[in-house]
Image (cartoon, helix red, strand yellow):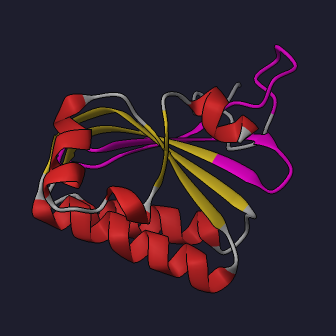
Amino acid sequence: MTDPRPPGAGTSDGSGTASPDVTDSCDGLRLETTRPADGTVVVAVTGELDMLTAPELRHSVAEQIAVSSLVVLDLDGVRFLGTSGLAALIELREQAHRAGVELRLACTERRVLRPIGIAGLHHLFDIHDDVQAALAS
């Protein structure tokens, strides 16, 4: 009998590429983690980043910071970024900085960039137009 669960993170899905690790919270946050290279993690965030979902983002990305040298957060799938989501991003940036890990954001969506700009936080983050640009910088 075959296992109906998808392969775990970093395992082959039969196509020769590593399959992503996907986490769906009951509050509508989806985190899809891929590892394009050793020490590099990309976390695609989909859904709302608010007081209900920010702790899940914080926890999941903190785990990646502990085992990586570069973490890229792809935020183009974020539909809403509240103050709790902003606080989580700031905390993750500080944690990455203390650990000597680079944290980069990939995003062009106004609904994410506008709250970051209004809060005057652009200077804190290394923001790129897409994941490839973030990985290449």
- Residue beneath the point at 82% across and 17% down: 14
Left or right: 57 with respect to 70?
left
Check the image and report above or below for 16 versus 56.
above
Residue at 62 percent of width and 55 percent of height: 71
Residue at image coords 53%, 28%: 130
Q: Estimate the x, y position of residue 129 in percent, counting from the top left.
A: 48, 29
Occupied quadrant, residue 77: top left
Q: Quadrant of the C terminus?
A: top right
**Residue 38 image point, x, y percent:** 86, 51
Q: Is residue 112 magenta?
A: no
Q: Would residue 135 appear left or right of 104 to someone viewing this image?
A: right
In front of the other: 117 or 103: 117
Write the start and end of the magenta stretch as one range.
Answer: 12-41
Q: Residue at x 74, y 36 (%)?
A: 136
Quarter of the image holding residue 11? Answer: top right
Residue 2 occupies quadrant: top right
Q: Height in image: 117 above or below 101?
A: above
The outermost residue toward the bottom is 98
